[in-house]
Amino acid sequence: MTTLTSVPRRSPVTTPPVRFRDLLASEWLKTRSLRSTPWTIALTALFAFGSTAVASLADQAAGSGPADFRPFDAYPPAGYWTLMLVASSMGALTVVSEYSSGLIRTTTVAVPARGSVVLAKAAVTAALWTAIGTAVSMGSFLVSQAILNGRHAGVPITHPGVFRPLVATALLAPVCALVGLGLGVLFRHAAATMVISVFTLLMLPPMFSDGSRWSADIKHSMVSAAWTRLIQNWEPDPGSLGYSATVPGSWIVYVLWPLITVALAVLVVRRRDV
Amino acid sequence: MPGRVPLGRVGAVIEVSELTKRYGGKTAVDHLSFTVRPGQVTGFLGPNGAGKTTTLRMILGLDAPTTGAATVSGVPFRHHPRGLRHVGALLDAGQVHGGRSAAAHLAALARSNGIPRRRVDEVLQEVGLAEAATRRIGGFSLGMKQRLGIATALLGDPPVLMFDEPINGMDPEGVLWVRRLFRRLAAEGRTVFLSSHLMSEMENTADQLVVIGRGRLIAAESVRDFAARGTRGCVVVATPRAAELAAVLTAAGGSVEPEGPAGTERLVVTGLPADRIGALAFENRIQLHELTTRTASLEAAFMELTADSAEYLAGQPR
């Protein structure tokens, strides 16, 4: 084991320029080198496809009227709440696992620019989960339409009203993953981060109703409510007593949640002891 | 290539000045000042809880000092956007993700600093982990994790190296290896700063010592000077004619102190070597039962100097 005779510095380590893309490559290596990453992604995708298949098969109303896109067959809440849960947990784990093992100290000694590390993690997480979200969203659409085609109720991807639900569902994954990552930096502990991200992403919205203005405003500022609105391909009933979220407002919710949590994370990580 | 030589070899000094860290009402590090110079192995000693790790963390910019400052090569370490080429550090061998292989762990760190991938294989070879490169770190023994931590520190070929308790968990062969490695790194002109709570570990490795207790500086000097501070060499003599021998030895220039219960006491003699005492006793026909030399040791010096400052003493809350 001991090799004292070896010359330690065969390749002189010179000082290359400081590049952000080196940090991206480093974070991608970290993500890729964990065996749990592909397994978790595969299982989540399978669960989403399964719930889509169940919802589409159970939809007795399909095929009775004129064929139109039925978003709740393609994107049933059971499958997609699971996707939100997994994406936010995995996003959180990219940082929480470093805090719990102490690896964050090794990382910070290697890269003292802590804000850059958080941004690199956020960028890699966003890219990875956008890819996964797109694949799962597309896959679910195809699964549901294949089943509904059997009842002549399927629609092609070019059908009006398909595109927005497809994109909103694809982006749900990176939005949740980034929120999880930001919360992970803020809270550092696995259990605390999971409880808080599940609470804010999934449990909080149903506690508010559309009945009163203030309650509806809070509800509509939540990610899951924004997603529900964005995949809804019909206009709200003008005679409805409840307040309805707007489409542009829902897109803004999609942008603000990850933006605010990641920005807070960058600010906090610079000031706090590691 | 700018930077390397002037930065690395001339001014690779760790400078700690008036460094203080308070956690609430507890002061972990208290106005600590010292300098660690290149070309030598400097030991950082203190009992458990003396503030060694907190000091190392402040030098590495992980913790912000309450007051005071720490610089490496004249710059606060946090000001470097990338760190591995400036300082290599092993703080805790457990600070790794158990699910990754040793090679993946090092490759990710190397990549973040723009260090070529072949350097990973070199340092793994260097620390003797080439065979285990693709195994998950979770299955490593503590000694192997220490080697991996040392590999991490060497990755950027830095002029300054810091190790917190690097010998913990190593087998005797590993201890010998690591001592020679530290000596060699210092001989290459690097600054090598090692913390330990074991004096004996430093006896064979360090040239200089920084000793702290309860966050305060106790000594910063060479190992030899430090040893000389502690219990001076003395000779213990047992004889039935203690009073007579004491008079003879005092006349010969020694200083004599009785030790132990009256009647069976021994004499503790300083200022005279054992052979001279033996000769004097023989000339005066005084029978000796025991003649033992007690040498000064670093351990004794360390215990003596840090006795008042030990954070946790067995059996007695301070």
Image: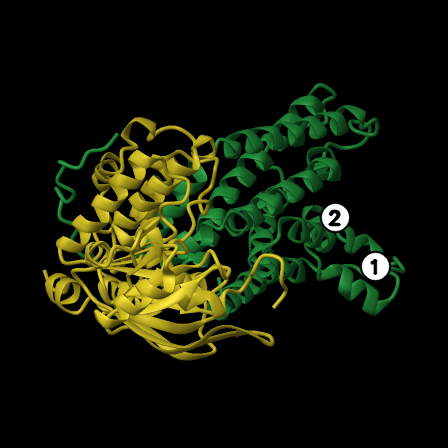
Chain colours: A green, B yellow
Does residue B15 show up?
no
- Mark 2 or mark 1: whose residue is earlier in sequence: 1
Image point (72%, 27%), residue name: A153
Q: Callout 1: helix, strand or loop?
A: loop
Amino acid type at mark 2: Trp
Amino acid type at mark 1: Phe
Residue A234 has which mark? 2
Query: Dot 1 corresponds to which residue?
Result: A208
Q: Callout 2: helix, strand or loop?
A: loop
Does residue B308 show up?
yes
Q: Quadrant of residue B81?
A: bottom left
Image x and y of residue A93, in percent: 56, 46
Image x and y of residue A193, in percent: 65, 53
Q: Nearer the viewer, residue A67 or A218?
A: A218
Q: Chain of mark 1?
A: A
Image x and y of residue A28, in percent: 40, 43
Report the number of discs.
2
